[in-house]
Image: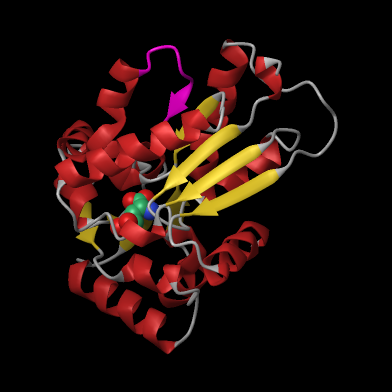
Amino acid sequence: MDNKNRPIGFFDSGVGGLSVMREALKIMPNEDYIYFGDSKNAPYGIKSAEEVRELTFKAVEFLLNKGVKGIAIACNTATSAAVADLRKMYPELPLVGIEPALKPAVECNSDGSILIMATPMTLKEEKFNRLMKKYEDRADIIPVPCPGLMEFIEEGKLQGEEVEQYLLDKVNTYKKGKISSIVLGCTHYPFIEPVLSKIVEEDTIIIDGGLGTAKELKRRLSEKELLRESSEIGKIEIINSLNKKDVIDLSYKLLEI
Ligand code: DGL
């Protein structure tokens, strides 16, 4: 098969990476996609970096065996644990990861602080701490670890009292005065953004890195002349390690949101 016609691989610990893939679909609708969600081993965010690294290596190998031409690690947790090693292992592969979108949050910062919601592991890892150091003089940045939040999305609970209460508790525990913006530093969280925006002030900006990551992926593929030239809408294949109909149905539903 012509390299340009090979699919693009997406990976996440579960269904969260679909929030990134839906952005990719908007700007690269003519590509074929294979999405692999590792819901069986989720959540990654409370595992050790070593465990997440191994699981991510396996997932990348799985996608490469499926013949993908480039890969998006659509998981902040897996990116912080594994992307540096993956770049060394596959220097020729168009590979993008995702990290909490701190830069745009700092750039549009008015008065108030910036909350970074992410998994405990993402916030503990060196990658995030380096990022935080880069911007900490320019804004009051507050990391907010959210263990237990991705589980709601994995169960298809995108709204309701439980989700709202969880978010209220988090925001109230960590905020100090006015919140200027909230960064969704886990790819599951954009799916509960409507609930979050209901409980914060109207002028609080909620930011996620999905579109930025999709654009970066497009740029890398284009650089290697790997973008598909067809004008037909591409195909989507969703694979999940849980192998359950429910999770596959939920995945397709999330892509439509
Ligand atoms: N979706 C993942 C992320 O972006 C993490 C969820 C998990 O804990 O597995 O960080």
Chief secondary structure of the magenta span? loop
- Residue located at (38% from left, 42% from top): 101
- How far from the left and from the top, in percent, is residue 207? 45, 51
- How far from the left and from the top, in percent, is residue 141? 22, 50
Image-quadrant location for residue 97: top left
Residue range in magenta is 90-97
- Report how many numbered discs are placed on residues in the image: 0
**Does the magenta run of residues contain 92?**
yes
Q: Nearer the viewer, residue 248 or 101?
A: 248
- Residue located at (19% from left, 66% from top): 176
Question: Looking at the figure, which quarter contains the C terminus?
Answer: bottom right
Tell me: residue 120, above or below residue 34.
below
Tell me: residue 176, above or below residue 76.
below
Question: In screen coordinates, is 116 left or right of 208?
Answer: left
Image-quadrant location for residue 52: top left
- How far from the left and from the top, in percent, is residue 230? 82, 25
Q: Nearer the viewer, residue 242 or 235?
A: 242
**Ligand 1 sits in quadrant:** bottom left
Image-quadrant location for residue 91: top left
- Residue located at (55% from left, 72% from top): 246
